[in-house]
């Protein structure tokens, strides 16, 4: 049966990640870094990926990883979501890793497991499992073309590029041109990857590897969205207990209390959905439906939580100084990432036989 | 007795001594109670073994496999879910021994005399009076929304024993014999056409002081036990995927492609997802209870199911097109159970409207979540320190 709780080990992992983020990933740090030339926090990435060994959670021990699983990775993503941490964990340690696991490429998996190499799947962030993806052209043994919307490409050491021969190719970052795109979410910035005769090593068939990677991405993104929503709710409740207008805490007004109670209910639901998806990915049981359910539910809840946080903070919520905008931008970007809720509902229509007219 | 294996053996021994096929249903249930296999977390001698609540599943699985009769829990939900925990916590030894066994076997049905026409969400404002006369209390007043009152032998009753103190302090909790003179039960017809509930008029009903539960003036605190258990019972049913109201809609959608429209499809998929997520949340809550770390999620389950039931059944009426304009039967009936699946979409739509009212309105539950779970400031109250007799009404 689906295990929807957190184990003691998972609680301990959460506590360790949260401690690190509390000390080294404050909202002020993230906001200041977001507009700099180096929006990613590579020192934080080093602590998470190398010192704590989290880059290899999904990689078998025999290949240098931790041999843990999706449930643990989900807990890490919850915490990274809470902090809107600008690190390539989802893109490298989850998505690229799953693509490589799909191809069985031991050499690159070993490198990603150490955290010293960052891998990025060169598929637009908005594309979900089962949708066709843009590919590079393979001409005379080298790769050509332009791929847009590639999250975290700026810090990638190696890009995993699908090509028109049906293969997935490992391409060194130095062999391509990466042009930053001005992104809605500055903490997970996008870039255009231009290939102009880049050489690559064929890892295997792209379609199954990309499908696998994007399915895990969609399923575990729900945990990041849970972290975002949980932060937005907790922070708003805290603020409304302190903020006084009309000679009383505004959190005592029933109109606001009901909105927060409703939001709490949605976060509680999202936790169950996200745990179910992580567990289904770990066990392989009922995975397609559970992932689609989680992603169809998670995105609107995370966005609403962030939007409610902004509105209920009043004017301060509209400022660059207050961290709620980081949460809102991430939540809104996440609602497009790896397929919108609507796309996942369309997938469900087939999966559970509730077909369109 | 905290070991699953030991309990399994004990259940098998019991089944060997009382083979379900050759034992009268009531004899079997009484014997099961006496063997401590009724509710294992209750004390020995009162239908239990003082075992962890989670071990009941072991007993139930053995009994089900053997084809044993059950006590028809849906029919006696108020007794099992609300009266019993309250009697267990506040009853005297004599009360527990007299009342719990026939309650559990279903020989004696229970109902709940709490709500009044003038005391709904503000239950503590209730005006039914109980006045002490010798060894008895003489009770006068009117109760409402009483399911099973027409079937019940007993009622849990809260009444005002001291009007001169603030409303929460002057209430006392009683067990009322529904066969006593002065108890009059009248059906209360609902928007569905049937009468699931009753109005109960109490006129000079004499209740012996020995049927008081808890101390005089402590009734509000005793009632909290009842109400907390009610909310758990309402939100806590275990469901398979598509096990709730979404089931009949999904079935109709699959079987009747001619009814499909794009708008309905979008709404159906959204509700299907929400129903599945609510089911997972219920499952998560049960897993928390099993490992003994109950979360506050229970408070939200009733809220979620109320809204979902209403939206899903509303969609279902629309989906049925021309048939959505019809209704299966307006005949005034007195059902023993609320059965959502035995009737048409129109009935489900109308009956589900009660889900956000019965057992605490959704508005009151949102207040409870906001104050008890999120710790937000309570509503400012003007009624807490005023004697009940001086309140505006």
Image (spheres, coloured by chain):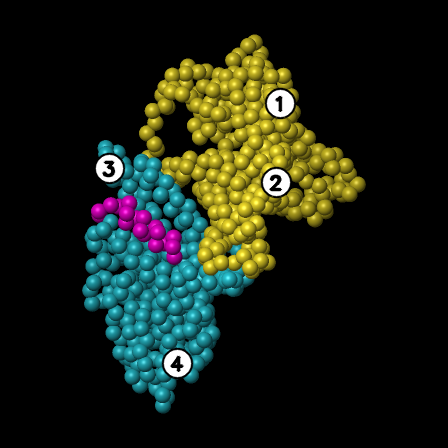
Chain colours: A cyan, B yellow
Picture quadrant where residue B43 is located? top right
The overriding secondary structure of the stretch rendered in magenta is helix
Sooner in the amino-acid sequence: mark 4 or mark 3: 4
**Image vertical order of residue B265 relative to residue A146, above or below:** above
Instruction: Identify whether B118 is placed above or below A258.
Output: above
Q: Chain of mark 1?
A: B
Q: Is residue A123 visible to us here?
A: yes
Mark-to-mark CA distance, 1 and 2:
31 Å
Residue tagged by mark 2? Answer: B329
- Which label is found at residue A76? none
The residue identified by callout 3 is A244
Q: Tell me, yes or no, if residue A227 can be seen here.
A: no
The one nearer the camera, B171 or A60, is B171
**Circle nearer the viewer, 4 or 2:** 2
Instruction: Residue at 32% x, 71% y: name it.
Output: A150
| 3D distance between C-alphas at marks 4 and 2 | 64 Å
The label on residue B178 is: 1
The range drawn in magenta is: A299-316
Give the SS element for disc 4.
loop
- Magenta-drawn stretch contains A313: yes
């Amino acid at each position: 049966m689906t295990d929807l709780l957190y184990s003691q080990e998972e609680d301990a992992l959460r506590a360790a990640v949260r401690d690190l983020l509390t000390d080294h990933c404050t909202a002020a740090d993230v906001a200041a870094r977001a507009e700099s030339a180096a929006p990613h926090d590579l020192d934080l990435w080093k602590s998470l990926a190398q010192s704590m060994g989290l880059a290899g959670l999904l990689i078998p021990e025999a290949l240098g990883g931790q041999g843990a699983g999706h449930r643990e990775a989900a807990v890490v993503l919850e915490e990274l979501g809470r902090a809107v941490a600008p690190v390539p964990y989802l893109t490298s340690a989850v998505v690229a890793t799953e693509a490589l696991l799909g191809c069985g490429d031991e050499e690159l998996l070993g490198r990603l497991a150490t955290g010293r190499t960052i891998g990025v799947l060169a598929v637009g962030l908005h594309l979900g499992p089962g949708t066709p993806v843009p590919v590079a052209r393979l001409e005379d043994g080298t790769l050509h073309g332009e791929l847009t919307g590639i999250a975290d490409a700026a810090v990638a050491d190696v890009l995993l590029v699908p090509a028109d021969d049906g293969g997935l190719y490992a391409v060194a970052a130095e062999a391509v041109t990466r042009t930053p795109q001005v992104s809605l979410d500055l903490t997970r910035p996008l870039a255009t990857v231009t290939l102009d005769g880049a050489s690559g090593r064929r890892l295997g068939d792209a379609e199954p590897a990309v499908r696998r990677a994007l399915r895990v991405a969609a399923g575990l993104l729900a945990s990041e969205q849970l972290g975002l929503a949980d932060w937005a709710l907790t922070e708003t409740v805290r603020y409304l207990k302190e903020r006084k207008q009309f000679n009383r805490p505004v959190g005592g007004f029933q109109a606001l209390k009901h909105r927060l109670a409703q939001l709490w209910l949605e976060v509680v639901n999202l936790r169950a959905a996200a745990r179910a998806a992580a567990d289904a990915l770990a066990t392989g049981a009922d995975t397609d439906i559970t992932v689609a359910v989680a992603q169809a539910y998670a995105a609107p809840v995370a966005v609403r939580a962030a939007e409610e946080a902004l509105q209920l903070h009043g004017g301060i919520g509209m400022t660059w100084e207050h961290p709620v905008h980081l949460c809102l931008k991430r939540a809104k970007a996440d609602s497009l990432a790896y397929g919108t809720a609507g796309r996942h509902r369309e997938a469900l229509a087939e999966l559970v036989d509730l077909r369109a007219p | 007795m905290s070991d699953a294996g030991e309990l399994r053996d004990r259940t098998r021994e019991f089944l060997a001594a009382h083979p379900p096929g050759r034992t009268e249903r009531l004899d079997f249930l009484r014997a099961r109670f006496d063997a401590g296999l009724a509710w294992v977390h209750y004390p020995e001698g009162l239908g239990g073994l003082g075992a962890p609540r989670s071990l009941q599943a072991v007993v139930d699985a053995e009994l089900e496999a053997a084809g044993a009769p059950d006590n028809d829990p849906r029919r006696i939900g108020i007794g099992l879910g609300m009266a019993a925990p309250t009697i267990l916590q506040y009853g005297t030894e004599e009360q527990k021994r007299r009342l719990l066994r026939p309650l559990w076997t279903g020989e004696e049905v229970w109902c709940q005399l709490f709500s009044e026409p003038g005391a709904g969400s503000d239950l503590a404002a209730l005006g039914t009076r109980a006045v002490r006369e010798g060894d008895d209390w003489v009770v006068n007043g009117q109760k409402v929304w009483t399911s099973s009152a027409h079937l019940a032998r007993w009622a849990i009753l809260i009444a005002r024993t001291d009007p001169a103190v603030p409303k929460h302090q002057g209430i006392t909790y009683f067990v009322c014999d529904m066969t006593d003179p002065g108890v009059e039960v009248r059906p209360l017809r609902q928007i569905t056409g049937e009468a699931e509930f009753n109005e109960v008029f109490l006129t000079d009903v004499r209740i012996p002081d020995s049927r008081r539960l808890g101390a005089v003036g402590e009734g509000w605190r005793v009632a909290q036990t009842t109400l907390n258990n009610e909310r758990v019972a309402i939100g806590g049913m275990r469901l398979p995927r598509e096990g709730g109201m979404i089931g009949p809609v999904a079935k109709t959608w699959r079987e009747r492609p001619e009814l499909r429209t794009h708008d309905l499809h979008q709404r159906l998929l959204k509700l299907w997802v929400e129903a599945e997520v609510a089911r997972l949340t219920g499952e998560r809550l049960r897993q928390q209870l099993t490992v003994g770390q109950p979360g506050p999620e229970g408070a939200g389950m009733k809220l979620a199911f109320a809204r979902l039931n209403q939206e899903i059944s509303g969609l279902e009426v629309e989906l049925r097109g021309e048939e959505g304009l019809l209704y299966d039967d307006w005949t005034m009936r007195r059902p023993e159970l609320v059965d959502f699946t035995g009737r048409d979409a129109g009935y489900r739509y109308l009956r589900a409207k009660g889900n956000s009212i019965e057992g605490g309105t959704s508005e009151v539950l949102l207040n409870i979540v906001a104050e008890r779970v999120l710790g937000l400031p309570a509503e400012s109250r003007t009624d807490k320190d005023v004697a009940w007799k001086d309140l505006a009404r």
